[in-house]
Image: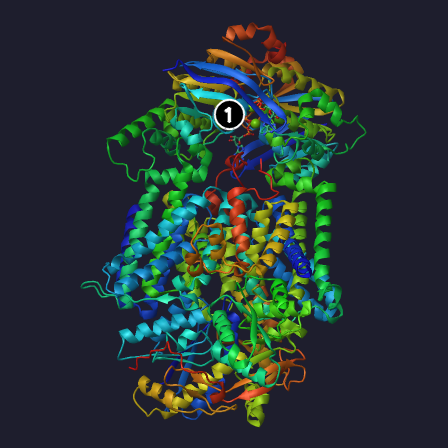
Amino acid sequence: MDTIVVALLNGLIYGLLLFMISSGLTLIFGMMGILNFAHASFYMLGAYLAFAATRIFGFWGGIVIGTLGVALIGLICERTLLRHVRRHGHVQELLLTFGLSFAFEELVKVFFGPYAVSYPVPESLRFAAFSIGAVQYPFFRVLIGATAIAMFAAIFCLLRFTRIGLVVRAAVLNPDMVRALGYNVSAIFSGMFAVGAGLAGLAGAMGGAYYTTNPNMATELGVIVFVVVVVGGLGSLSGALIASLIIGVLVNAVVYVDTTFGDLLAKIGVVSAETARTLLNVPIANTAGVLPFLLMLLVLMIRPQGIAGDERV
Amino acid sequence: MSRIVLVLLGLAAAAALVALPALGGLATLNLANKIMIAAVFALGFNLLWGQAGLPSFGHAAYYGVGTFATIYMMDAIDRGGSFPTPLLPLVGAGAGFLFGLVAGWFATVRSGVYFAMITVAIAELVSALAQKWEGLFGGEAGIRSIRTNWGPLDFQSTGSVYYLTLAWTLVVLLALYGLQRSPFGLVVRGIRERELRIRFLGYDAHRVKTVVFALSAAVSGLAGGLLAISDESASMVLFGGAGSAFVVLNTVIGGAGVFLGPVIGAALTTSFAYFGSSLSHFWPFYLGVVFVVTVLFAPEGIGGAILARWRRVRDGTGPLIGLGDLAGLAGAVMAMAGLVLLIELTGTVCSEAYRAEIASLKGVWPPVRIFAVPFAPLTPWPWLVGLVALVGGSRLALGAGRPVLPHLFAGRPGPRAEQTRPGESP
Amino acid sequence: EPVKVAYLTPKTGSMAFIGAMYDPTIDFIVKPFNAAGGWNGNPVEVSVYDDQGTTQGAADRFKQAVADGARIIIGAGTSPLAAQNLADIKRWNQRNPDDPAILLIVGAEGVNFTGADCSYYSFRFTTTPYIRQNALAKVMKETGALGQKVYSLQPDYTMGRDMEAATVANAKTYGYEVVGTARHDVFKIKDFSSFIEKARAGAPETIFTANGGSDLQLILQAASSAGLPAKFAGMFLDEPGNLAAAGPAALGNFTAQIFNAQAGGEKGEAYRAAFNAATGRDPVAFMSNSLITLTMLTHAMKQVPAAPKLPIKALITAMETTKTPWPLGDLSMRADDHQLQLPLVVSVVSKDAARKLDGTDMGFKPVKLLSAEEASTPVNPDCKMVRN
Amino acid sequence: MNANTLKLEGVAKTFGVVRVLEAIDLDIRQGERHALIGPNGAGKSTLFNLISGAFAPTSGVIALNGTSIGGLVPHALNRAGLGRSFQITHVFDRLTVRENILLAVMGRFGKRWSLMRIGPVWARIAEETDRLIAGANLAAQAEKRAADLAYSEQRAVEICMTVGTGASVILLDEPTAGMSREETRHIIEFIRRMTEGRTLVMVEHDMDVVFTLADRVSVLVNGRILVTGTPAEIRSDPRVREAYLGDGEH
Amino acid sequence: MLDVANLHAAYGHVKVLNGVTFQVPDATIATILGRNGSGRSSTCKAVMGLLPPSRGAVRIGGRDLAGLPAHEVARAGIAYVPEDRQIFRNLSVEENMILGMKAGRSGKPSWTLDELYDVFPRLRERRNVKAGFLSGGEQQMLTLFRSVLGNPDVILIDEPTEGLAPKVVEALAETILEMKRRGLAILLLEQKLAMVMRLTDRVFVMGRGEIVFSGSVEAFQADDEIRRAWLEVS
Ligand SMILES: Nc1ncnc2c1ncn2[C@@H]1O[C@H](COP(=O)(O)OP(=O)(O)OP(=O)(O)O)[C@@H](O)[C@H]1O
Ligand SMILES: Nc1ncnc2c1ncn2[C@@H]1O[C@H](COP(=O)(O)OP(=O)(O)OP(=O)(O)O)[C@@H](O)[C@H]1O
Ligand SMILES: [Mg+2]
Ligand SMILES: [Mg+2]
């Protein structure tokens, strides 16, 4: 019982971290239609900036600087680069961010070298929030989860209760018309992009401390955030949340499955027990890493608009 | 007039290519091989992207499958099977085609971003499978085989591999060019422009897209087959994201809208990686910057820029290389030099080795050698020079480029056509 | 006429951290060797080639290296890269029987390199998971750290599978029970807490793992933040960056090391000090393998008599027959499978270690130094070496 | 063959809770030009979309030449003899005018997978393409990219394509939208010429166009067919005046 | 009062406006006539700042707006109803309307949502439907209402009757007259001559990017020469 609760909790918190990273991506895609390949790089930059700032400003200072710094980087990227390719369409934007992700990863190595850096959660935050049976549940995990939830609430309110969400959504398809109605579209776009990047920066500043901070962290996470966003439904915030949680719980739960694909299929009667033991002898527990891709493929085939995405008009 | 120039250029290029083994060393030949393999791969990729407008971000899967299939066939030959060695790439092509047929059928159900994500998912799954299925893919060590001679033809030397690769590259070029010009190629381009319309003209768009996907996978697989012949080995590393990323890079830098664009891109980035990596450890960063700059200022790629100038000459609207181009080029070179200086300085000063050196010199900062020129990192001069070159060069390039830029953009659809259309995914 | 040596390693790409380790080792060995006259008056010239961490890159660099005239190839990358190098060496020698080349594998631990794929022309200068697991289990058993219940948590590729097999195979020898095994995708899992909880269910006292890099760091973090009482016994804990990234989570875990100055006593400390004076760093992890490789290479060269061109076969023979002094004990190359026979140090991460690493307050405190004979495992029966 | 080329029986469509079309019955006769008019939001475009397979009807049967075409995908519909143009122009921007039209003609002659232009059929395809281009007065523009044409010329290309597939029933959605009086006059003439001998169904708000071009007119109001008749009948029908035309100049 | 003086503008190298000059006083409906492609829509875009003018002035209340970004022009009190129904397809009808809402600068009577819904009740029925699902005519009305809700002083309306059923055209004409009653300066671009003659106070004729005629409806009707030269196709 305790194990199940802990497993579920672990899955949920990991899911929330995934949401933290992918919320910015969802926001930028849903609002501006930019599929930002460099988003995971913003996550990485957040971690590195926070790491660099921690030495001077302490842990919390690092978190703040990581978040704001990446927001600023996002702002600069939007103003100096993305803005100029927008008129060539989304594919060009996608390519640009693809190039940026490439450059950012190398840039980090220029400054911080190819190894992981030492950016740990401070001793003062390493305590148990509560315990479930024998398991002391770490406070920092809870903090990550809480931040993600707060983030969701904040973005939700921003989009729901202010006109900004409407303006941005409208401006994606008809920027000129929105301008003609009196809105400063370019300022709003820049701001939105900065917020999206800042969210990734915050996730990086926290995730980098809890997990690791190394030059490959963007590549390792890059694809999975896309999976989250696609499964959730491109541009849907609540979809991203649901997808994050599903993926989080799934990859955590599958570890506990003590059977192989072969056995499973044999049990259903699809293949013979012989085949099961020889050809398909892959323990399901080993597939945690590829499960999200299977899930994505499945979702794309069955419900291409994702869990909560609507069919765009 | 222009046609004659083109024919002459083509002949000169052909002569140079045929004579290369006599002129270049082993390393040059090998580089040429790798360029051609990358070019064939990029051409295959661009069949899907440039022609059908389908952006695949997981094309390494078909390339890798082609390599593995060819290695297995080479092994079969080595064990006494009979298959003509020169035709080995067809095995890769066949494997790529079959796999592409299945994957393409699934992927092309969707379009746009969704299509791209399906290709990524398929590539990731194949990559995972390759890691887990050691029996087939050889695990970490991979699998290997050896080229066997065929009849009087000897395939042991790099030179012979070069000619084989060259021959296949030409075959692929001709075939793809023919395909592009064929009525079927027209249908494919129609799908890129407006799929819905194509369907209302009576074409089964899904089937057409599946076939194009499979053809593209086949050409990629053929490139994989050429790689197998050249390297005589295959491993799961081939399925990694890097392969899929590089083919996109090659195509974009060269220009997806120009037939020879991918070839130009492949030649540039492959040589850049080849020479760059022995000059600086930060070469991938520079490549990334070149890529971003290309996307920003030459969305049609280098091939597109060349083509625009060629057209300019042909139509008599301007010289092949104008003053603005020269200034732009000079500015770009200057900016790049400044960037390289700054990055090399920063990278070296931040490196562990340098800090260790400082420690062993008891706090003295030794000069940083960049291309054998020593720079004193504690004085402001090298930094200032780098900054000035970077900023000044960019200004020069941008300012000078301004009248030139519209030409670069010449290939895009006019504003009227740019309005969003209903029924099309973003 | 210099003797050309090609050093193939990833300097860029996601594997760049591997290549970065080797830089300081080359000059440290080669400079004094050349100063002392090199090979019969010919200096050794080592050129570094960036294979970019890809097998295609490795194949390209190999071709470039032999074109540049190098016949001694040092393959200092991961197992896939070394496998590519090995394939290339075999092809080269097959096609150029009169001008053979040799491959010195620095860091790849795949069993096959001295097993099914062993070759007369290739040498492996590191251990295998079997050797490391054996050393760890032996020493931890002796010092009572091992316990009765053991778990295996491995990356799901060849090395992890070998480590798992070794862990299961040695259960009887060292009297422990394997309470569970798990494997995971490489570099794809961010949150290992479920793996940790699953392991906790079997209440293991020791967890064997062949993990390295960020996966290892993440596992240690997850275990420590979940308060898992078991200790880890691993292969690559001493790679640079790991202690820094894992932080306090690293404390109390065991690793089998190639080099540890403290374990070598005065000799060891002197060696470390000399290296540090020259390069500003301590030799750790695969840096030591590179030092061993270059030391043994130069040492063997000294046994090869003068000739117009370095005779490769004579070099192979010298490599197989000479014992090379090393601060922790003599090194030798087993002729049967070209597997390095080396002393191993089993250490524990501790704040009491003589040398602190990565700017942390932790280091590796030796528990026991195993001599080459003690650390050795039998010849792999899969190795059928053709000696010509 | 069934004289009623296109026959709708009880066709209805709801979106969620909104009932857009209720039980439409319509007989379009062989070779006639039939206009569909009605107030904004009456469901004309929806009906078009149902016929052309973009949506499936909620209930009812749509039959082309006596066989049901319900549930057919666009290319199958086309091969069954139905062609459509789009309210917003759907030409292939980066292909030349000739290529645009060639695509349509090629398909009609079954050359959908051809790799080479060899054989007598290609001569006929080229001939037919040229004929269409000439008919649309586009000979001078044939090698221009479609995107570079004026709007009215694009519409002409669009209609050429629809006709070029050899469809026997042609649907046109507001073919004169966005054109000046003069251009409109021009395009009406063009449509009349190109669709000679085929069945034409069109949606149009411009009464001049409707009354000059159509043989029969159906008025759709609130998802129902109010009346079908000749232009003269429609013009004088009081219900139509009330619901659609208003008391303006018509 | 909208005062446009000597306005020049170009698409790239192609000049479309060569010194356009005209005035529309408050509470006046003025119409620009002209052939397809004469540059009428471009005039509106240039006034709005969507097509940056290269020369000339656009004054409203004495302030020159030429060269300002579009959102500044809009905030200064000019509204624009484009010819190509630029509704926000991915937003609901009501969200489209909300986006248009803006307080007027002067204390003129303001428009309310309900009032406009009464003019064209279908939109009220459709308020929660995505605007992309609307029929062509419904979209056209939505575009107009959205701009009106911004309580502008000047409104530029490009081809409003396009795709509207004759009966709805009536309602539209009524709305435009109501705007005039509330004091707006209205610039209309329209092809349907009958409708123009009924509504407008002033007529401008545009040709080759210039205003070639300017005067009252009567003067226009009297001038056959102008009609023949600039409006009809021989
Ligand atoms: N997908 C949909 N969801 C909800 N309502 C819809 C949808 N599609 C159309 N409608 C509604 O159905 C009605 C009929 O629309 P349709 O486009 O067929 O009208 P129409 O007769 O073509 O009008 P117009 O002459 O203005 O173009 C409209 O009121 C529209 O809002
Ligand atoms: N975005 C654009 N890029 C280039 N040229 C354009 C663009 N928009 C319009 N033009 C050209 O500018 C000229 C004037 O166009 P404009 O749309 O202002 O004419 P108009 O009088 O409104 O005609 P219409 O009756 O067709 O609406 C035309 O020749 C047109 O082809
Ligand atoms: Mg309609
Ligand atoms: Mg206009």
- Crowd band around label 1 with a 10 angstrom C-alpha radius: few (<14), some (14–19), many (20+): many
Residue C231 in the image, given as x and y percentages of width and height: 62, 75
Which image quarter has ligand 1?
A: top right
Residue E16 position in % (x across, y down): 55, 32
Q: Residue at x 49, y 29 (%)?
A: D89
Q: Nearer the viewer, residue C35 or A269?
A: A269
Answer yes or no: is residue B283 visible: yes
Quarter residue E80 falls in? top right
Q: Nearer the viewer, residue E157 or C360?
A: C360
Residue occupied by mark 1: D50
Evaluate whether residue C19 shows in this view.
Answer: no
In this image, B75 relative to B250: left or right?
left
Q: Nearer the viewer, residue A20 or A126?
A: A126
Residue that appears at 32% across and 26% down: D128
- Looking at this view, name the residue that lies furthest to the right: E107
Q: Is residue B154 left or right of residue C143?
A: left
Residue B239: x %, y % from top left: 44, 59
In this view, E187 is above or below B132: above
Chain to which mark 1 belongs: D
Q: Amino acid at mark 1?
A: Leu
Colour mapping used in the image: rainbow
